[in-house]
């Protein structure tokens, strides 16, 4: 059986969509290539209860994103975890604001040649909103990354 690129992308998109249905905190799953300025190859989004695969004309280049640069420079084969940040589309913060942590796993074409990576946006907005409800008025909390930098 010949597996065309379109069939492969459709199948991967279906897998990503099913993962978004199954994992309530996942808001986006993408396969990003290392070529073509980090162009997204396949992307599925969740908006409320709607899950969909993004059309090819709406896929974005991500080579200027901090997470892309860190993954590209890394020689690790381990899961990459980003700092918390606001989700952005086409360079603009998504409204309503969505606080996300990105988890990515590099994909290798051959032994040491990185082809791309799968990256999942995990939405923490509801968790932090719930903290605001249970903490006393005037209580402050901080998110500190592994370098002790406040996010």
Image (cartoon, rainbow, N blue to C red):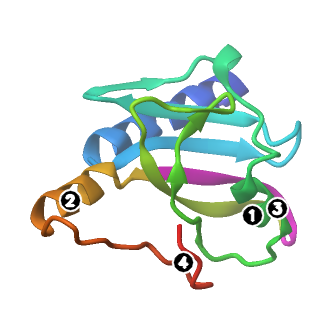
Q: Residues within 10 Å of mark 3 (few under 14, many from 20)?
A: some
Q: Is residue 113 left or right of residue 29?
A: right
Q: Position of residue 145 (x, y in %)?
A: 54, 78
Q: Which residue is mark 1?
A: 71
Residue 7 position by quadrant: top right
How far is the residue under mark 3 from the one under mark 2? Answer: 36 Å
Disc 4 target residue: 145
Please tell me whether residue 42 belongs to the stretch shown in magenta. no
Considering only order in the chain, which callout, 4 or 2, is on the residue closer to the N terminus?
Answer: 2
Residue 72 at x, y percent in the picture: 82, 61
Quadrant hosting residue 15: top left
Asked if the residue at tag 1 contacts the one at tag 3, i.e. Cβ–Cβ closer than 8 Å, the answer is yes
Q: Give the side of residue 60 with respect to residue 133, left or right.
A: right
Q: Position of residue 99 (x, y in %)?
A: 43, 50
Dividing the picture into quadrants, the one containing residue 110 is: bottom right
Q: Which residue is mark 2?
A: 132
Q: Quadrant of the N terminus?
A: top right
- Residue 70 showing in the rendered view: yes
Q: Nearer the viewer, mark 3 or mark 4?
A: 4
Disc 2 versus disc 1: distance between alpha carbons? 33 Å
Label 2, label 4: how far apart the Cα atoms are = 20 Å
Q: Which residues are magenta?
A: 111-121
- Residue underneath mark 3: 72
**Whole-number angstrom distance, CA of label 3 to CA of label 4:** 20 Å
Q: Earlier in the sequence, mark 2 or mark 1?
A: 1
Which residue is drawn at the image coordinates 75% and 41% (left, top)? 62
Q: Are marks 2 and 1 in contact (CB under 8 Å)?
A: no
Residue found at x 45% / y 40%: 16
Let me know if residue 117 is in the magenta part: yes
């Amino acid at each position: 059986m010949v597996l065309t690129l379109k069939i492969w992308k459709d199948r991967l998109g279906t897998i990503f969509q099913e993962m978004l249905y199954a994992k309530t905190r996942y808001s986006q799953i993408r396969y990003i290539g290392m070529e073509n300025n980090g162009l997204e190859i396949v992307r599925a989004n969740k908006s409320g209860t709607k899950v969909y695969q993004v059309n090819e004309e709406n896929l974005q280049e991500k080579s200027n994103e901090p997470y892309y640069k860190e993954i590209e420079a890394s020689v690790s084969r381990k899961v990459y975890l980003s700092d918390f940040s606001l989700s952005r589309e086409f360079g603009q913060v998504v409204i309503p604001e969505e606080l996300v942590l990105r988890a990515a796993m590099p994909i290798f074409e051959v032994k040491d040649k990185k082809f791309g990576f799968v990256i999942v946006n995990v939405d923490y907005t509801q968790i932090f909103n719930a903290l605001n409800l249970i903490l006393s008025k005037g209580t402050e909390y901080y998110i500190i990354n592994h370098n002790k930098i406040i996010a």
